[in-house]
Image (spheres, grey):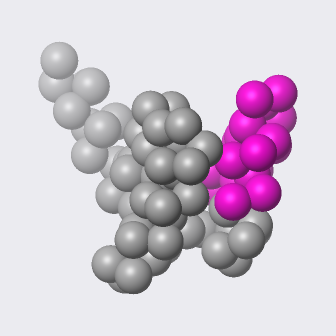
Amino acid sequence: MGSEMCIRDSVNPSFHLLEKSYRGMNIGNFDTFVNFFLDSGHNINAKNPEGKTLLSIIQEHEHGKVYAVVLKKYGGI
């Protein structure tokens, strides 16, 4: 459990929120969420511990392509 805490603690909070919303929301809700996410000062280009943005990860997922369009619309790289 101790090592789990370290891994979780090392994840950028903006990346964590964005990844959880991608995994749990339909595309319409995700688009709305990203707008509020950015208005709240979060970073759409936050990176995971491996140095990847959510956009770079989901572009490899077949169902992620429509989500990638949303991230790009709001400045994702």
Residue at 73% over, 71% down:
73
Quadrant, the C terminus: bottom right
Tally of numbered discs: 0
Q: Can residue 12 be seen in this view?
A: no
Magenta-drawn stretch contains 64: yes
Q: In which quarter of the image is residue 6?
A: top left
Q: Looking at the image, can residue 66 be seen? A: yes
Q: Residue furthest left?
A: 2
Q: Residue 23: horizontal and vertical position, in percent?
A: 51, 32
Residue at 82 percent across and 27 percent down: it is 62
**Front-lying residue, 16 or 31:** 31
The picture places residue 18, in percent across and down from the top left corner, at 47, 52
Is 56 colored magenta in this rendering? Answer: yes
> Residue drawn 64% across and 56% down?
53
Instruction: Indicate whether 69 appears above or below 77.
Output: above
Q: Which one is in front, 25 or 4? A: 25
Residue 8 lies, with reference to residue 29, above or below; the image says above
Q: Which residues, given as a range, are shown in magenta?
A: 53-70
Left or right of residue 53, residue 49 in this image: left
Residue 15, placed above or below residue 64? below
Where residue 64 sits: x, y (%)?
Answer: 73, 37
> Residue 50 at what x, y percent from top left?
60, 45
Pick the quarter of the image with the N terminus.
top left
Q: Which residue is drawn at 34% across and 58% down?
A: 13
Give left or right: position of 66 versus 74. Answer: right
